[in-house]
Image: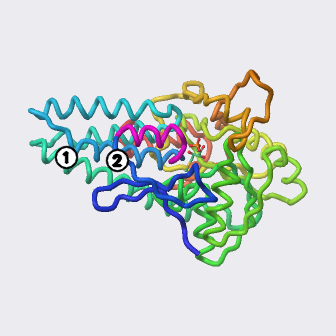
Amino acid sequence: MSIPLSIKWEDGQLSILDQQKLPLVIHYLPLETLEDVYDAIITLKVRGAPAIGITAAYGLASAAQSYEVNSLEQFHQFLSRDALYLAESRPTAVNLAWALERLKASVQQSATVEEAKKHLLVEAMNIYEEDEASCRSIGEFSLSLLNDYTKVMTICNAGSIATAKYGTALAPFHLGSEQGKQFQVFACETRPVFQGARLTVWELQQSGVDVTLITDSMAAHTIGAKGIEAIIVGADRIAVNGDTANKIGTLNLALLAAAFQIPFYVAAPSSTFDLSIESGESIPIEERPSEEITHIAGKQVAPENTKVYNPAFDVTPGRLITAIITEKGIIYPEYTENISALIGTERGEK
Ligand code: MRU
């Protein structure tokens, strides 16, 4: 039994577990150029908010090693240009812009180009290591919250392969497995691209967690029929008032949790909070190609020229969220006050 990892940095080479090929093929894809990194992110070969940020950080640090520049000023220009390019690959997960900003900030005090190149690599590694530690801590806090529950539902993949290790929403299940607590996890398949069926089921099987796959449309029935006791999901961006963007279908689960009167938890590191926005109304929602809906595994299932709407994320209002589990602790409503207190002050933003 082992917890799978999605990002590897070995001997100066970045490679990612190609999540498009999972679960049938386990292949680590080397990312040689900035364009490779952009392509891996936009085509969901690497996905999940923290994993996108970490991959972009390593990708930028790696690209910067070969900058041939005449001055530090030119180095900063190249770095900003490439950071902007990667930041545009996917709009919703704030971890991407956050990680790239951290890299840019890490070279502000560098005295030479060589020093700046080293600082970038160190910062990318720091982001990776901090995320692993954050996810472990989120797992421990989540385990304490889920202590009395066994049957838990989730959507998408907010797991180890969406982060440095352990995941966010899936971290309590991995840690529970290590510590002898056996959950029964119900994973929504997560249309249109099946992160639940392809990734969550595979990942939890790897660490010996009891996992049952359902289609998204079975969630309401399953909560009643199987006695689901809680729902836990990840996040791509959380506003100051607790409004949370996550994989499309998350809002459905939050509404169901309210109707069935079971707790609805969001698990996310502080890098997923966007304290520059007051509410979810300001969160950009990515719209993806229509083929993700009209085709399944490359096979057309809808008529030719079908009109499609394909938002990749939805926003769950803070009022539907029982608690937000972070590496720094568990945040309960009133969110505007409590998020600012726990996350805002840490970043010196309050
Ligand atoms: O489109 P994806 O697969 O990148 O969407 C991912 C999610 O919505 C996850 O729940 C979120 O990024 C949290 S990952 C720890």
Q: Find residue 33 and report its horizontal and vertical position in percent.
A: 34, 42
Q: Residue at x 66, y 54 (%)?
A: 198
Q: Residue at x 34, y 48 (%)?
A: 58
Residue 313, disc: none
The residue carrying mark 2 is 32
Left or right of residue 44: residue 190: right
Q: CA distance from mark 1 to mark 2?
A: 17 Å
Left or right of residue 130: residue 18: right
In the rendered image, is residue 270 in sight? yes
Q: Residue at x 47, y 36 (%)?
A: 274
- Dot 2 falls on a residue whose secondary structure is loop
Give the amino acid type for the residue marked by disc 2 in the picture: Glu
In the rendered image, is residue 342 in sight? no
| Above or below: residue 302 compared with residue 135 | above
Nearer to us in this view, 185 or 258: 185
Q: Find residue 331 and report its horizontal and vertical position in percent.
A: 57, 49
Give the amino acid type for the residue marked by disc 1 in the picture: Lys
Magenta stretch: residue 234 in it? Answer: no
**Mark 1, other Cα within 10 Å: few <14 / some 14–19 / many ≥20:** many
Quadrant hosting ligand 1: top right
The residue carrying mark 1 is 117
Q: Is mark 1 within 8 Å of ligand 1?
A: no
State which region is magenta. 34-46
- Dot 1 falls on a residue whose secondary structure is helix
